[in-house]
Image: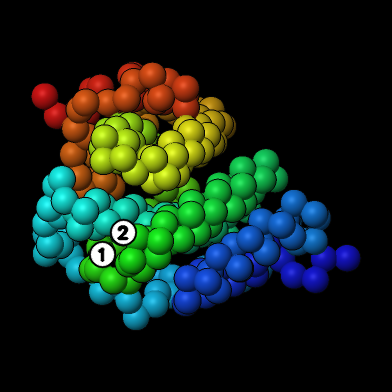
Amino acid sequence: MADRSVAEACRAVLTATAPADKIKAARAAARDWRLGRLAFEFDVAMPDRPARPDRPELLPPNRMPKRGKGSEHGRIALIHAITHIEFSAIDLAFDVVGRFGGEFPRGFTDDWMHVGADEAMHFALLDRRLKKLGSFYGAMPAHDGLWDAAADTAHDSLARLAVVPMVLEARGLDVTPAMVERFSLANDAVTARILTRILNDEVRHVRAGTVWFESRCREMGHVPETTWQALVTRHYRGLLKPPFNDSARDSAGLSREYYQPLAVR
């Protein structure tokens, strides 16, 4: 007999404030779902915004301080920025389950619970790395652009899938290889290995977004590529900038037919 619903477990992640508590709630939710301890019910609403610790200070993207390239401080600042992205990604994964899971078969919840567990693990690895380097998560400001994208698509599961995994996470596929090379050249093999693991996992995350986006489009009689382009044009505030990691995107099922027509020339 399940003692709580999957929606309650997701809400517990989103309302956890301290990073350690959010990781604990994320791991518990993913484990309990995997072991059949959560009812497949969506009986509570997700919060409009997830709980956040007092630090890092959240600034608009245009007020973020510049990271010095090539210096140790610049590398730590980059790790901090990636750590914040992974922290936000925990909430994004569990929000998509709690908010939209009832619209999809159980396999959708299977996939995004797995993604949420991955994001919690990524955050924990990076958080530990920051501490090893004499810093900590919250030592520098960050921006909340990822959650802004979630808020803009809170009403529409297709729009959420189009923007979060298929634009924002796909961007990670494009930029992470260069970051791996940067840390390798700086003789920071530990961070390079963490980022390589994240890159490999993100291919699976983008694939989950693409698979469920295309599944819903088929149900609705929509053409996936043109539907995606219309949703991205409407809901994504940024630009799709090359170069693209076409091979990683192809591995994730995100073909050039999706993004090339919107790419900035």
- Along the line of sight, which residue is nearer the eye, 201 or 108? 201
Occupied quadrant, residue 41: bottom right
Residue drawn where x is 67% and y is 45% of the image: 110
Residue drawn where x is 34% and y is 43% of the image: 188
- Quadrant of the snapshot with the N terminus: bottom right
Is label 2 in a helix, a strand or a loop?
A: helix
Question: Between tags 2 and 1, which lies in front?
Answer: 2
- Quadrant of the snapshot with the C terminus: top left
Instruction: Check disc 1 and report the residue beneath it.
Output: 142
Whichever of labels 2 and 1 marks the residue nearer the N terminus, that label is 2
Residue 158 is situated, as x and y percent measured from the top left of the image, at 44, 43
Q: Is residue 70 above or below residue 136?
A: above
- Tell me whether the residue at label 2 lies in contact with that at label 1, contact meaning CB atoms closer than 8 angstroms: yes
Q: For the residue marked with disc 2, what is the amino acid?
A: His
- Along the line of sight, which residue is nearer the eye, 219 or 109? 109
Instruction: Check disc 2 and report the residue beneath it.
Output: 80
Is label 1 in a helix, a strand or a loop?
A: loop
Residue drawn where x is 26% and y is 64% of the image: 142
- Along the line of sight, which residue is nearer the eye, 221 or 70? 70
Mark 2 to mark 1: distance in Å?
8 Å
**Which of the labelled discs sits on residue 3, or is there none?**
none
